[in-house]
């Protein structure tokens, strides 16, 4: 199965090398850069020739990467990986095994945060229960999807915020989204920067606002105000 790993990046020199090392061999790696001013592109060039310059915005960057992916047809697979998130050893086999079920169109990995803080252990538990029982898999869990299904639902629509939630909601109408019983590792930077309570409350509030109909564009303006 041809696999394209798509990484949206913006000033990710601190994390990108470890992320790229975790991918391994035998897959296409696409870096979509949103205007980095650090060494992000130089690091990326050591691992792939497929580096795309794009407008800033995670949804737009990932859509651009998907359009450039060589993974083709129903056999092709897209995996969207955040630049601060590392894939586990043997990840490719886990993904290919679950996709032997034709009813499964995609999924993600269990979340593990790079921190010993009890509060973030709690976040992991909640995220993994949410993903397993509600099928709500978020971007920091490395969403993967058959390319034809991704294209059929229109991709990320270039959304600047909630792009992962919106995509998974549409994909679930086409087929099963499965949580793999294996963990990815993501950095704790967003909690470290703003604090556990503030970050968690803000995420929940913005998620509620999205579900009651506030547009992702409006949420984006408020989020980064």
Image: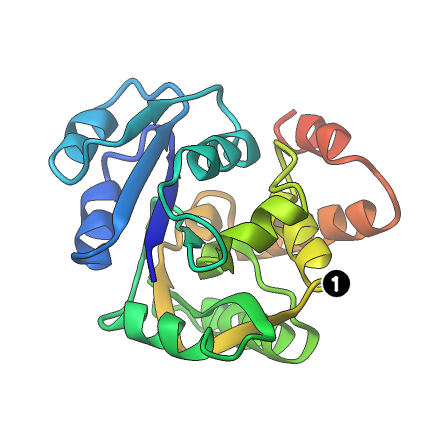
Residue 23 is drawn in which quadrant?
Answer: bottom left
Quarter of the image that includes the C terminus: top right
Q: Residue at x 48, y 19 (%)?
A: 55
Q: Position of residue 201 (x, y in %)?
A: 68, 54
Q: Closer to the camera, 118 or 86?
A: 86
Q: Quadrant location of residue 3?
A: bottom left
**Residue at x 82% of width, y 51% of height:** 211
Nearest the eye: 111 or 146: 146
Q: Position of residue 193 (x, y in %)?
A: 45, 43
Which of 119 and 166 lies nearest the eye of the viewer? Answer: 166
> Looking at the image, is 131 positioned above or below residue 142?
below
* Nearer the observer, 77 or 169: 77
Position of 167 with respect to 108 (left or right) is right
Residue drawn where x is 19% and y is 31% of the image = 49
The location of residue 188, given as percent across then percent down, is 39, 55
Mark 1 = which residue? 173
User: Where residue 54 appears, x then y in whole percent?
Assistant: 43, 21
In the image, taking residue 26 as reference, residue 169 lies left or right, namely right
């Amino acid at each position: 199965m041809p696999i394209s790993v798509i990484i949206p990046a913006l000033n990710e020199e601190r994390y990108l090398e470890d992320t790229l090392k975790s991918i391994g061999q035998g897959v296409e790696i696409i870096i979509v850069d949103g205007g980095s001013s650090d060494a992000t592109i130089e690091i990326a060039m050591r691992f792939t020739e497929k580096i795309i310059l794009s407008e800033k915005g995670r949804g737009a960057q990932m859509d651009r990467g998907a359009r450039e992916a060589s993974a083709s047809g129903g056999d092709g697979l897209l995996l969207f990986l955040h630049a601060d998130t590392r894939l586990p050893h043997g990840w490719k086999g886990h993904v290919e095994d679950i996709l032997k079920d034709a009813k499964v169109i995609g999924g993600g990995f269990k979340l593990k945060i790079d921190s010993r803080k009890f509060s973030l252990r709690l976040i992991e538990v909640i995220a993994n229960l949410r993903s397993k029982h509600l099928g709500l898999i978020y971007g920091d869990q490395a969403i993967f999807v058959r390319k034809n299904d991704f294209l059929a639902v229109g991709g990320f629509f270039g959304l600047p915020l909630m792009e992962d939630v919106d995509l998974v909601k549409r994909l679930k109408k086409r087929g099963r989204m499965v949580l793999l019983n294996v963990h990815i590792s993501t950095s704790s930077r967003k909690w470290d920067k703003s604090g556990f309570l503030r970050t968690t409350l803000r995420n929940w509030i913005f998620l509620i606002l999205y579900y009651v109909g506030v547009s992702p564009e409006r949420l984006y303006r408020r989020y980064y105000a």
